[in-house]
Image: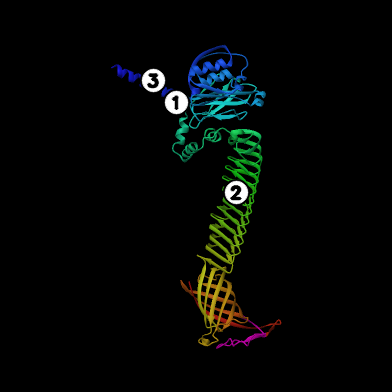
Amino acid sequence: MMKSRYFLWVALVVASLTAYAQVSVLDRKISLTLNDVVIEEALDRISKAGNFTFSYSPGVISVVEGTVSATFENQTVREVLNVVFRGAVQCKARGNYVILRPDHDQASRKKEVITVAGYVVDESTGQRIRDASVYDPLTLASTVTDASGYFQIKMERPPGDVILSVNRLSYVDTVVTVSARTGSDPLSIPIRLNREKIDAMGDSLSAKFKRLWKGKDRSTSSLHQLNVTDTLYRTAQMSFLPYLGTNLKMSGHVINDYSLNILAGYSRGVNKLEFGGIANLVEGRVEGAQFAGVLNGVGGEVAGVQVAGVLNLNASTSRGAHFAGVLNLHGADSRGVVVAGVGNITAGSQGPAVAGVLNVGGKTATMQVGGVMNVALDTVKGSQVAGVLNVALREVRGSQIAGVLNVARKVQGTQVAFLNVADSMNGVPVGFLSFVKTGYHKIEVGADEVFYNNIAFRTGVPAFYNILFAGAVPATYGDPQTTWTFGYGVGTAPRISRKLQLNIDLTSQQVVYGNQLKSLDLINKTTLGLDWQVFRKMSVVVGATLNAHLTERDAEPYPSLFSGLRPEVFFDRDFGHQHHMRMWLGGKVGIRFF
């Protein structure tokens, strides 16, 4: 029986010592009375009462002048030391040692710097809260509570009492008023859970991101970003790097009228003007003008002028004028002028977008001008002008002008390029070839007075189409000098009635004898014809032609063009010093499909 009681007593002692050891030395509670004792004796009695050892330099002793008199009843070592030294000594725990260091910020003390310290606790449970943000809205002095819920904040003495804001993720924002007295007892600030905030956050992506962020980054500035929702205002700020400036660790919560960032800076917003040697980073809105050597990054709306040596990165609507040496990247509409040396990428463009290489945007209301390429992911109400390619995935209400290719789904206006492609067209495509899915497509088999076997492909729209064709003289088949031709033309087909169309074509074709193309031998035609629809997919065409045959005077003798029908040539003479032309009236007949 005695042995059992002995082991039980030992177990209780070990458990008590273990629990005691787990508490920080500074949070051990002691009771003692100091009655007119010098600082060395006071430290000796405090260490014995708390069962720990002090480590300090001689400079600590000189911090307190005279003797110490005070009574402490069940207070933490931290609270006792704060009263003894009047907040002028820094305390850190290392195992069973308490290290004391004098505060060397003498300049601040001359400026009437005060220290406010205390604990932040849960109002319901009394549990001390770590990672809570505590700050002074006037001086922007700030800190976060440690693992024991303790904070110590220094600030210039205000004319009246100190007002502190206490913020913590998932808790109600709390404001407390503290008497501006140096060396007062540590505060105990209760804060209350915000059930509405917790319910609103739930398991949202934002909440998960914040929990992840908190687990990865426990710096003061990052914890402020998690905890603090207040917006503060300052006329001007200057920083060297983010959080290294006059707005201190509260930079992400301050809106400035004027901002100067030597290298880079971070703020909640800018109202008038900001300069950055490398980068300006703004979480919210920017108004006025913003200049950066490399990057302007804005999470909110931009209204004004924005200039960056490399990149303007805006997450919200951008109004005004935006100039970037390389790229403008806007996550929302750009409602102004956007100019970049390489590219503009926007969710939508309600003003001119000009880039040396590429423009990519959603709805475009005025103009995209790209040195190489423009891409509109939505409707274009205006113009696309590119050196090589324009693409509009939806409707174009205006024009597309490109050096090589235009592509659009629906066009109400004009396409001008070497090659034009569209699903539907209410306008005119102008180019070497135009393909409109719902437009004008004809395959023609026909004959004229020179070439009895001809095949042609017509593509575009009735108002303007392209013609590719080839033909041959059957009588020359098998001869070494088979006479054949190829050519290109354009035309228009106004409708006379439901089944009858007029054709006006201009074509030019090269005549080839055999397999060698040695000299100019062009037949240029103006054709006036009628297209009569016999069946839904077939029509018959007849027409009259005015022909002008142009050859070179110094070339080898040309074989005769006419193998059967010989029209009357009414014009036959030299043309200039090197060419000869003859003209005649002719005709054509044919069948068209589709």
Q: Badge 1 local density, few (<14 within 10 Å), some, or many (20+)?
A: few
Dot in front, 3 or 1? 3
Determine if the magenta segment contains residue 238: no
Mark number displayed over residue 510: none
Q: Residue furthest toward the right?
A: 577
For disc 1, the marked residue is: 22
Amino acid on which the number 2 mark rests in the picture: Ser
The secondary element bearing badge 3 is classed as helix
Find numbered disc 2 in the image and state the secondary structure of the residue it sits on: strand
Name the residue nearer the viewer: 108 or 300: 108
Query: Is 570 in the magenta?
Result: yes
Is residue 170 something that shows in the picture?
yes
Amino acid type shown at disc 1: Gln
- Name the residue beneath numbered marker 3: 13
The boundaries of the magenta stretch are 547-572
Q: Amino acid at mark 3?
A: Val
* Residue depth check, mark 2 versus mark 3: number of the one nearer the observer: 3
Assess whether mark 1 and mark 3 are in contact (beta carbons under 8 angstroms): no
Residue 65 % position (x, y)? 63, 16
Q: What residue is disc 2 on?
A: 334
Helix, strand or loop at label 1? It is helix
Residue at the extreme top: 35
Residue 162: x and y, percent?
60, 23
